[in-house]
Image (spheres, helix red, strand yellow):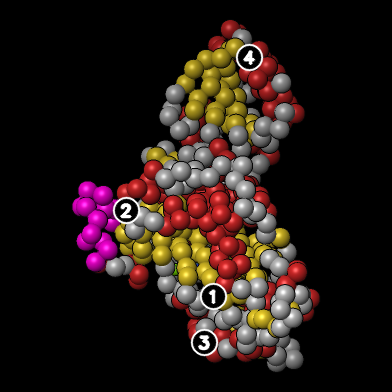
Amino acid sequence: MRASRYFLPILKENPREAEIVSHRLMLRAGMIRQQGQGSFSWLPLGKRVLDKVCAIIREEQNRAGALEILMPTIQSAELWRESGRYDDYGKEMLRIQDRGERDMLYGPTNEEMVTDIFRSYVKSYKDLPLNLYHIQWKYRDEVRPRFGVMRSREFLMKDAYSFDLDYEGARAAYNRMFVSYLRTFTRMGLKAIPMRAETGPIGGDLSHEFIILADTGESQVFCHKDFLSLDVPGEDVDFTDDAEIGGIVRNWTTPYAATDDMHDDKAWDAIAEGERLSARGIEVGHIFHFGEKYSKPMGASVTGPDGKEHFVSMGSYGIGPSRLIAAIIEASHDEAGIIWPESVAPFDIGLINMKPGDAECDRICAELEQAYEKSGVSVLYDDTDQRAGAKFATMDLIGIPWQVIVGPRGAAAGEVEVKRRATGERHNKPIAEVLAATG
Ligand code: ATP
Ligand code: MG
Ligand code: MG
Ligand code: MG
């Protein structure tokens, strides 16, 4: 991609409305544009990151056995009357009427709709376990939308829903999502700590929030320092092995960790002071087991091996990709801008031409650009005639992990300069070597 043809509306000034660093940097880097209270457009650079984040979530959901679907954003109030939540949900739900004056709503979550899909098709325990997920926009009429996409009204959510014959099966499904979440956040360079949490309007009796520690977080959290050194399972983890998955969950739920609502002073006092971590945190994911809360009132049952009808035991599992991106920036930035972990970076390489119009510089840049693209390495090539200083500042601001700098002096020596964004380290490298590496 050439910067001269890209749409990257960089802001030089700090936007006044942005209170936290991620919001500020997302606006300055031209990733998002505010359209209204708690509503944002994703501009090209932001959209690339969003896609990367969703791709990782998808891979890890699929690996854990979940199946992707796509449900509508607008739902009928009828379904929500069946579960009893239409009246319970309160003002966070955006309520709408269609032209026939039928009550509709913009989905804040999808338990009812997915339960309706399930009950229409699945009749036997032999078709279980089943886990269906989608990545879809949600709307919650938050009282105080703030911090950009961290707490917006319209936001993206990955929500998965599991269906099992009994508690044991549902618990195994819960464990699979738990482990899938550990992998998901780690792949994005984040340390997420699962904490016992309240179930809120989703309901249920077993629940963990996945929390990123950050000073700008909205929740107060308490946990044991051991979490900082626990191992996250690798790609080879076997999601069909309930014992293995259960063991990982046990490891990750043994040290103390709780959010404010569930905090237990007695358990806390029992931990040595030097081992305690009391901090602010950002909720990036939340998993629930709620059993028959929806399957019973909505009549979602299957025939069991005993020939009898059983209401299915359910759970739901959410991740907010848009909030996650803000959390990644909170965890990874410096004075000059964003520092993307390679796994979610909008481009792998930022290629800077120090002297566009110089035949050698132009030729080398074009050759590198082509070689990268051919080998599947994404590159943003700054071919504009801006000052070199401005180009460096932009590359630092938008946080691309590697910068490759091509200037007339290096070109004459057959070299380019390579800079690593995270550390600022620079070194010269023969062009032939860079090209060979793309091989
Ligand atoms: P919060 O406590 O921050 O209001 P929640 O507990 O209401 O979040 P859940 O119903 O658990 O949210 O939804 C699952 C995930 O969706 C959350 O863990 C979070 O990542 C994301 N999410 C929820 N509300 C918002 C929002 N207003 N803006 C962006 N992401 C959100
Ligand atoms: Mg909320
Ligand atoms: Mg919450
Ligand atoms: Mg929650």
Helix, strand or loop at mark 4: helix
Camera-nearest label, 4 or 1: 1
| Residue ID for mark 3 | 88
Indicate which disc, 3 or 1, sits on the residue closer to the N terminus.
3
Local crowd at mark 1 within 10 Å, few (<14), some, or many (≥20)? many
Q: Is residue 367 above or below residue 224?
A: above
Indicate which disc, 3 or 2, sits on the residue closer to the N terminus.
3
| Amino acid residing under circle 1 | Phe
Q: Is residue 148 above or below residue 388?
A: below
Q: Magenta residues? A: 266-280
Local crowd at mark 4 within 10 Å, few (<14), some, or many (≥20)? few
Residue located farthest toward the front when viewing the structure as drawn: 306
Helix, strand or loop at mark 3: helix
| Residue ID for mark 1 | 290
Indicate which disc, 4 or 2, sits on the residue closer to the N terminus.
2
Helix, strand or loop at mark 1: strand
Question: For residue 267: magenta?
Answer: yes
Q: How far apart are marks 4 and 2 (CA)?
A: 47 Å
Tag of residue 433: 4
User: Does ligand 1 reach within 8 Å of label 1's beta carbon?
Assistant: no
Disc 4 + disc 1, Cβ < 8 Å: no
Q: Picture coordinates of residue 116 (x, y %)?
A: 71, 79
Indicate which disc, 4 or 1, sits on the residue closer to the N terminus.
1
